[in-house]
């Protein structure tokens, strides 16, 4: 244990001194600070770049009606468009309007022509050179009330009758899973699942490659031949995994601490929502936080053991990328399985994947957030993952001992057979 601690301390300090660690930590902090002010910046930019839409009215009175509709929309939901009447010197005809757009005189127009087939609803035509989604949604939001009012007249129904047609068919919905007290608590907990997938994937993409390259570099320099006299290969790999893991956790803690302070100071927490449902970090169950930390650590250790084993098979850093590919593929499969578990957490595939150590950290935590998982399955997933980590480190150590005296790359199959 002393050897593992010594190597872990060495790796931890070595990572903290690198320019890459310092630069990525600083960039992450700058990104978090920028993110807290991003909504304000986006809102300001959208207002500055509001599209000017010319209303060409062949019906009469429509410009006034649409302008009133736009002004009646609350400011927080108001689309970033500005309505202008058609200039007197331009004919309200589509060919003339297209020529104005082509010449760059106007950027967009809505042509309103009289109804056809005896209907009350006029025909709305939107045209622009840069026809983006925001422009279309904004114009749709403005013209929809006028169109709906006239459709009711065509169908000879009252607004109350039209509203009755939109009443949901399911008159009563009962959620028998009472583990969440309200929708906000449920959505906030589900956001944790997305956060775990993102953090674990990001951690292994960055630190997994560092671990593999570090093991390969030390093998290539033949330094390890002398170190293996006093430490076992398993102790060496375990120390590297723990040291790099501590460095990654420290970096995340710095980011989280600064992010919480900045977000709280800027009032960003009060505006956090998913699909209109506010996020309440204080409403997250403590058990979900503990599960989050547990499966993050297990996921890091499991994949780090595989990355370390991959590094044992090469002697040069240039060869590390090829050996890492199988581990990266396992991570990608786990990532997609976790997203599949979001929609069907109790399905057969999700249950099997959650008990498979390669996929357990991502899939099991997703299942815990989305459904009630029997405690025996949670305990079994943890035990299986711990056993897998121990076996991976042991096998990695044997692969290291087998290949350390070789000067050429050894593949997965050859290394495992030799171990």
Image (tube, rainbow, N blue to C red):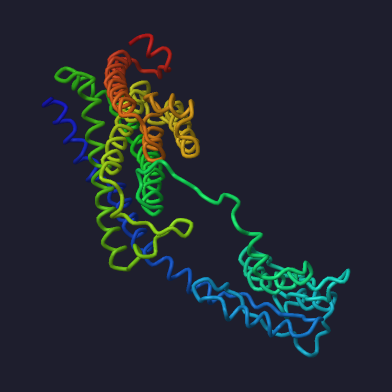
- The answer to whether 217 appears left or right of 110 in the picture is left
Q: Nearer the viewer, residue 11 or 150?
A: 150
- 374 sits to left or right of 116: left
- Residue 263 pos. (x, y %): 31, 63
Is 208 situated above or below 408?
Answer: below
Image quarter hosting the C terminus: top left
Which of 202/257 is in front? 257
Relative depth, front residue between 169 and 123? 169
Q: Quadrant of residue 39?
A: bottom left
Q: Quadrant of residue 399?
A: top left
Give the quadrant of the N terminus: top left
Left or right of 131? Residue 323 is left
Taking the view exactly as shown, the residue that stands out farthest to the right is 117
The residue depicted at 45 percent of the width and 56 percent of the height is: 274
Residue furthest left in the image: 2
User: In the image, what residue occupies the spot 48% across and 74% down?
Assistant: 44
Q: Position of residue 41 (x, y in %)?
A: 44, 70
Q: Where does the image place residue 134, in percent across and percent down from the top left?
A: 61, 66
Instruction: From the viewer's side, name the closer residue of 112 and 35.
Output: 112
Name the residue: 65% across, 78% down: 52
């Amino acid at each position: 244990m002393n050897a593992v601690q010594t190597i872990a301390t060495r790796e931890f300090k070595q990572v903290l001194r690198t320019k890459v660690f310092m630069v990525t930590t600083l960039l992450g902090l700058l990104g978090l600070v920028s993110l807290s002010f991003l909504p304000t910046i986006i809102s300001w930019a959208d207002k500055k770049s509001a599209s000017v839409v010319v209303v060409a009215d062949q019906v009469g009175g429509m410009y006034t009606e649409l302008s009133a509709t736009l002004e009646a929309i609350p400011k927080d939901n108001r689309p970033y468009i500005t309505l202008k009447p058609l200039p007197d010197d331009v004919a309200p005809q589509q060919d003339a309007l297209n020529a104005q757009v082509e010449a760059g005189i106007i950027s967009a127009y809505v042509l309103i022509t009289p109804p056809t087939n005896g209907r009350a609803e006029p025909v709305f035509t939107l045209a622009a050179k840069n026809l983006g989604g925001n422009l279309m949604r904004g114009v749709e939001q403005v013209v929809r009330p006028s169109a709906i009012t006239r459709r009711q007249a065509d169908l000879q129904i009252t607004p109350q009758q039209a509203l009755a047609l939109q009443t949901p068919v399911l008159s009563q919905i009962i959620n028998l899973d009472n583990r969440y007290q309200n929708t906000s608590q449920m959505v906030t907990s589900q956001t944790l699942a997305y956060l775990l997938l993102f953090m674990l994937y990001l951690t292994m993409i960055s630190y997994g490659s560092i671990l593999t390259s570090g093991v390969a570099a030390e093998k290539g320099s033949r330094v390890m031949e002398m170190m293996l006299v006093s430490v076992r290969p398993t102790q060496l790999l375990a120390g590297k995994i723990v040291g790099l893991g501590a460095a990654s956790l420290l970096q995340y803690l710095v980011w989280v601490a600064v992010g919480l302070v900045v977000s709280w100071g800027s009032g960003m927490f009060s505006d956090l929502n998913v699909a209109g449902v506010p996020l309440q970090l204080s409403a997250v169950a403590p058990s979900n936080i503990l599960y989050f930390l547990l499966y993050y650590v297990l996921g890091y250790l499991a994949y780090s053991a595989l990355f370390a084993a991959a590094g044992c098979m090469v002697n040069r850093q240039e060869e590390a990328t090829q050996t890492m590919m199988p581990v990266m593929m396992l991570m990608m499969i786990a990532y997609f399985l976790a997203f599949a578990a979001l929609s069907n957490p109790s399905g057969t595939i999700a249950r099997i994947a959650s008990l498979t150590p390669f996929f357990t950290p991502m899939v099991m935590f997703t299942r815990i957030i989305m459904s009630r998982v029997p405690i025996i399955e949670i305990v079994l997933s943890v035990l299986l993952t711990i056993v897998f980590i121990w076996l991976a480190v042991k096998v990695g150590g044997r692969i290291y001992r087998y290949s350390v005296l070789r000067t050429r790359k050894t593949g997965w199959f050859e290394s495992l057979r030799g171990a």
